[in-house]
Amino acid sequence: MNGHTMTLLSRLLAISVSTVCLFGAAQAETRLLTADAMLNVETGEVATGVGVLIEDGKVVSVGPLAAMSVPQGTETIDLRGYTIMPGMIDMHVHLMGNTDNHGYAALGVSSHSDTIYGVVNAETTLMAGYTTVRNVGAGAYSDVALRDAIAEGAVPGPRMFVAGPAIGITGGHCSDNNLLPAEYEAVGDGVADGPWAVRTKVRQNIKFGADLIKTCSTGGVLSKGTKVGAPQYTLEELEALVDEAHSHGLKVASHAHGAEGIYNALMAGVDTIEHSSFIDDKGIALARENGAYLSMDIYVTEYILGEGEAAGILEESLAKERMVGHVQRTNFTKAHEAGVKMVFGTDAGVYPHGQNARQLSRMVRFGMTPLEALQATTINAADALGKSDTIGSIQPGYFADIIAVKGNPLEDVSLLEDVGFVMKEGVIYKPAE
Ligand code: ARG
């Protein structure tokens, strides 16, 4: 064997070794996970003396250790001092981009740069205990690429459900860029006006790999020149969008702050309303009737009003946030009391990734029990994704997405801000100390 062959061989070996170590590679061997306690997010029961048997990335059995039949030689991971629960799900994130870039600072950044930061943000999010996220809008289908790279095991990150470019009106909150003057002729990836143009955009997003459709039925806080109270899209356009998406089996998420845009989205049949800030009794009744979920990002206001100015958020956006943040929290309480279904969605990306769980304690402060807040980020989110049969719960046949915290999260939900162990599909990304 000459020197050249040797080098080639060792290179090939190195490649095959690194392939084996790829992050997503499901572990074929059987493992037993034990901990001090396990929180059942369906019932709120905290059981001791239980184990979870895992094989090929999936839960095989779960229950009292004494009654469990464990194959001989099974490796045991003993999380002493920890409580385990299902991996969390954030239904409203924007993983792409550097979160330091707000307002005009975001203009000089390429989608390539956004994607590279997306890779970093994905890992941060996973390490914080989020094993699944819904990424609600990204340019250039960079979210599709990141989702696939994570699924293929090339980079670590949460399981992603992605929207591709958000679809909206000319000059709209989620579709367009209003920062540049007319001579630049800048038009966002997702701009479409009129029912047929909207259908074309939906078809295009499906063609290029979207898992869901994101639209905007009102203006927003962080977009220049849009009004949070003003509807975006007519009912006719929204109906076309939802019909097209649903006929292909995709769910629809609509950004909506103002009451009228919330009605329009609900009447058109969207599956989740994002933000829902000015939802009123009529909107609450419609959401209940339709079984639509609200995803209310009630933490982010603290970041925008506290650190937004230094971060470059436009003054007009800060002014809008002063109108929205407080009302949104009041309406969160009201909608929850009225029995509207809720999921956990944060808008992480506006603020640093990995801090998602800060919102849980706010959801409790504004009316939920700790268990309800944890259900919003597990079983409810899984249901809203249409994935109740594989994620959100620790059950036989489900993905082994399991996290652990020190203590009982039902006594202090902010324990989830410091997740000490993360497993996704049976692979340990963050080992317990
Ligand atoms: N992306 C949203 C928007 O620009 C953020 C809203 C944040 N404010 C709030 N209170 N949730 O409209």
Image (spheres, rainbow, N blue to C red):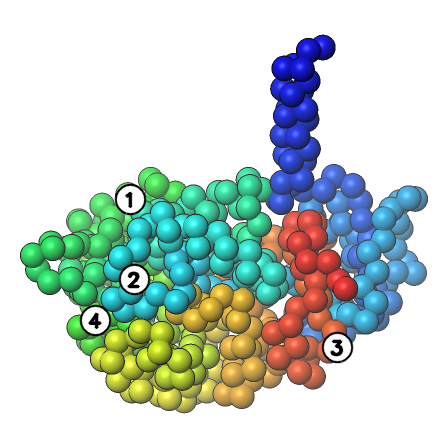
Residue kind at label 3, given as amino acid type: Gly
The image shows residue 272, relative to residue 69, as above or below, that is below
Name the residue that disc number 4 marks: 224
> Which secondary structure, mark 1?
helix
Q: Which mark is residue 203?
A: 1
Image quadrant assignment for residue 234? bottom left
Number of labelled discs? 4
Image quadrant assignment for residue 412? bottom right
Ligand 1 location (quadrant): bottom left
Q: Position of residue 31 (x, y in %)?
A: 80, 49
Q: Is mark 1 within 8 Å of ligand 1?
A: no
From mark 4 to mark 3, how far is it between C-alphas? 44 Å
Name the residue that disc number 2 marks: 106
From mark 4 to mark 1, how far is it between C-alphas? 28 Å
Residue kind at label 1, given as amino acid type: Arg
Q: Is disc 4 in contact with disc 1, using a CB cutoff of under 8 Å?
A: no
Q: Is residue 368 visible?
A: no
| Left or right relative to 145: residue 204 | left
Q: Nearer the viewer, mark 4 or mark 1?
A: 4
Q: Is mark 4 within 8 Å of ligand 1?
A: no
Residue furthest out toward the front: 3
Residue kind at label 2, given as amino acid type: Ala
Kindly identify the residue that appears in the image at 35 percent across and 57 percent down.
Answer: 137
Q: Tell which circle, 4 or 2, labels the residue nearer the N-terminal end.
A: 2
Residue neighbourhood size for the residue with mark 3, other residues' Cα within 10 Å, grouped as few (<14), some (14–19), many (≥20): some
Q: Nearer the viewer, mark 2 or mark 1?
A: 2
Q: Tell which circle, 4 or 3, labels the residue nearer the N-terminal end.
A: 4
